[in-house]
Image (spheres, helix red, strand yellow):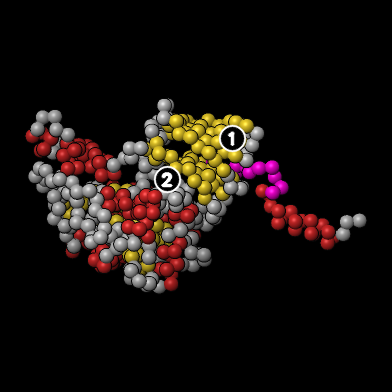
Amino acid sequence: MIQRRDLIQAGTLVLLLGRAQLASGAAIVAVRVWPAEDYSRVTLESDTALKAKQTFIGQPPRLAVDIEGIELNPALRELVAKVLPEDPNIAGIRVGQYAPGVVRLVIDLKQAIKPQVFTLHPIEPYQHRLVFDLYPTQPPDPLAALIAERLKLKEGAGAPAPATSAARPGADPLGDLIARHADKTPAPGIPAVPALPARGNGTDRLIIIALDPGHGGEDPGAIGPRGTREKDVVLRLARRLRDRINARSVNGHTLFAYLTRDGDFFVPLHVRVQKARQVQADLFVSIHADAFYTPRPQGASVFALSHGGASSSAARWMAAKENKADQIGGINVKAKDAQVQSAMLDMSTSAQIKDSLRLGGTLLSEIGRVGKLHKPRVEQAGFAVLKAPDIPSVLVEAAFISNPEEEAKLNSEAYQEQLAQALMRGIEGYFAKNPPLARNRSV
């Protein structure tokens, strides 16, 4: 007769071996596709790590991938239906059992791409991930896109076309506007955004505010008790604030908002900073919704960068949590560009921090008029997303999404309106006391 101890020992052995050793191969547990202008991502999540060999074929453009150690299953077949018609990079996906234990995946592309294929170790809430990041070989220019959007808004409002376009037959108004968008002087030791030659006599100074909705794509951010995802509510808030910014001016200068993401996709922390510098933003406002491991904390917070230690243990904890976004969202740590940009992030200036504290204080006072504050002062910590060396940058935690009452407020149209108005007043108040640099940037 088998003794009870023997059964327990046998069960322990099963637990120690795990599913990977007992099963014949890995199993796909989920598949996801994240389309965006910047890049499209395909993610295969499995119970054990996957090995893949990829080949890019130029004509017609497609990426063929052989994934070893798996069999075709229903979850993997779902990938075919997950490609959206409006995906700017992926035309379709085909999957099939190429050989025993080998599944072939073919991603048909709409344009030439530079693929990055890499694996990610398990991190809550994900198991092992095999990631395909498909970057266009000619990436979109955020500055050109921003000015084109500004032109479209002006034409929709019935504004006259820029004088430069009428002055010369056949002139490209977008090209003229980009040419007149002069670069800021970078902080010492910081690589400059390429200087743009000034042409024309622009009269309408364009002030650009970079709005950074936190998280996105693979990274949902914090999740409230009722299932509200941080990435969703902060994107809605950022869009509301964008609409207000685009309808305002300060001392005759046009305000214009630029979103680091205007959809549900992941943007690495260093890329958020890079995007703000590429459009030569005057301010950077990263928007989040706090979470804590208990439901008691409540109220909004504003953070600026710290060169030294954090201003409180809570600020240090919050920075560490937000800085984990790259691990959750997933970046290719072997990519050379990411290493270069990460090095650049460590070069911030005291002047930038001083201006950021001014901006944060103005925003905090306005937010306090529409809701509770978690702390009455601007906190400081080493947030990676605030390390633009030449742009005043703050991170706004709109509310504690982990608090059921505040989760409901974040989902409320009325509260989102009030908060967007408060942030707008704060931005206007900052520029009223801190006029923008007199750059010849016009539209």
Q: Residue 29: within the magenta?
A: yes
Q: Provide the secondary structure element on which disc 2 rests.
A: loop
Q: Examine the rendered structure and indicate whether residue 173 appears above or below residue 225.
A: above
Which mark is in front, 2 or 1? 1
Q: Residue sitting at 39 percent across and 50 percent down? A: 336
Judge whether residue 264 can be spotted in this image: yes
x and y percentages locating residue 260 in the rendered image: 34, 49
Amino acid type of the residue that numbered disc 2 sits on in the rendered structure: Phe
Q: Residue furthest right?
A: 1
Q: Quadrant of the C terminus?
A: top left
Q: Quadrant of the N terminus?
A: bottom right
Q: Residue sitting at 45 percent across and 62 percent down? A: 321
| Gap between marks 2 and 1 measured at Cα | 26 Å
Total marks shown come to 2
Task: Name the residue beneath numbered marker 1.
Answer: 103
Q: Is residue 394 left or right of residue 59?
A: left
Q: Name the quadrant containing residue 134.
A: top left
Q: Residue sitting at 43 percent across and 60 percent down? A: 323
Q: Provide the secondary structure element on which disc 1 rests.
A: strand
Q: Sort mark 1 into few (<14), some (14-19) or many (20+) by Cα contacts within 10 Å.
A: many
Q: Is residue 254 left or right of residue 369?
A: left
x and y percentages locating residue 67 in the rendered image: 57, 38
Q: Residue 255: within the magenta?
A: no
- Residue interval drawn in magenta: 21-31
x and y percentages locating residue 263 in the rendered image: 39, 44
Q: Nearer the viewer, residue 206 or 370?
A: 206
Res. 265 mark: 2
Task: Name the N-terminal-most of marks 2 and 1.
Answer: 1
Q: Name the quadrant containing residue 100.
A: top right
Q: Residue sitting at 62 percent across and 32 percent down? A: 99
Amino acid type of the residue that numbered disc 1 sits on in the rendered structure: Val
